[in-house]
Amino acid sequence: MTLKVFITGASSGIGEALAVYYAAKGATLGLVARRAGFLDGLNQRLGGCHACYALDVADAPALHAAAADFLARFGAPDIIIANAGVSAGTLTEYEEDLAVFRRVMDTNVFGMAATFAPFIPAMKAAGGKKRLVGIASVAGIRGLPGAEAYSASKAAAITYLESLRLEMRPYGIKVVTIAPGYIETPMTAVNPYQMPFLLPVDKAAELFAATIERGTTYAVIPWQMGVVAKVLRLLPNWLYDRLFTSAPRKPRGLLK
């Protein structure tokens, strides 16, 4: 039986790498991104047989329509990967950053729920080994300076996915939370600082797919960042504040 995978944020970065990975395995894909041209180009590279939906994940009606089309053509997906996300440096003291803050939250949190929502009834009815996958970030483990919106959105995503996991458990639907560290993508390319354990995106896609296949409830990738994340979580506030107050920041106003 052909694997069916629905991926948001598919036009570049992690989403594109995952699309390439699953297409190579013979999967039928639903590809979502805002940039129609990039999606079409990716689809052609992957054989031209996949469903493409040019939309913004913050637009729930558009996602509902895309889900209805995918379900009608292919049936319930086996894997949904809510990968679409944006990042920007934000500072609450600047009023103009509030619009960026809203955009980050709408995409990274609301967009994740809006991606899953129209598929869940069909996935429940279909049974079998189903996966709802949310791409969070180690930035959601502790608040990072200059990344108030991004850290908040990823912390919210982690907690949201945990709640969803409990709700889906009686139906046998696995909810997988993946918190990437630094991955070589356009999002990290703008970071003006060193990124430890930076992972090539194609290698990251392989590790993500293995995690999804296992149905692991929560994973930090690469594993080295998982160790760092655990240490950071254990630090008392006074020590964390002393170590990170002067940490380098992502540039303000860059939505990537």
Image (cartoon, rainbow, N blue to C red):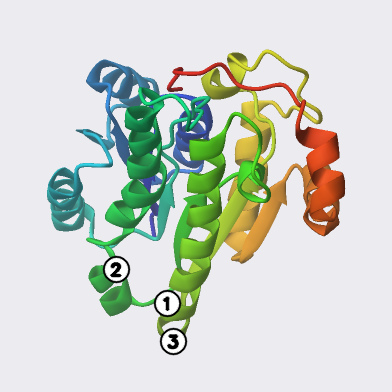
Q: Residue at x 48, y 38 (%)?
A: 149
For the residues labelled 1 and 2, the Cα–Cα distance comes to 9 Å
**Quarter that holds the N terminus:** bottom left
Label 1, on which residue?
A: 168
Asked if the residue at tag 1 contacts the one at tag 3, i.e. Cβ–Cβ closer than 8 Å, the answer is yes
Q: What element carries label 2?
A: helix
Q: Which mark is residue 120?
A: 2
| Left or right: residue 88 compared with residue 122 | right
Residue occupied by mark 3? 170
Placement of 192 over or under 185, stated as above or below? above
Identified at 19% across, 42% down, the residue is 59
Instruction: Name the residue nearer the viewer: 81 or 30.
Output: 81
At x 37% / y 26%, what residue is drawn? 95
> What is the spatial separation of the Cα atoms under label 3 and label 1, in whole angstroms?
6 Å
Q: What element carries label 1?
A: helix
CB-based contact (under 8 Å), mark 2 and mark 3: no
User: How many angstroms separate mark 2 from mark 3 (CA)?
Assistant: 13 Å
Say which amino acid is labelled 1. Answer: Met
The amino acid beneath tag 2 is Ile
Q: Is residue 181 visible?
A: yes
Left-right relation of 215 to 252: right
Residue 220 position within the rendered picture, expressed as x and y whole percent measured from the top left: 70, 50
Earlier in the chain: of badge 2 and badge 3, it is: 2
Q: Identify the mark at residue 154; answer none if there is no mark.
A: none
- The vertical placement of 197 against 209, above or below, is above
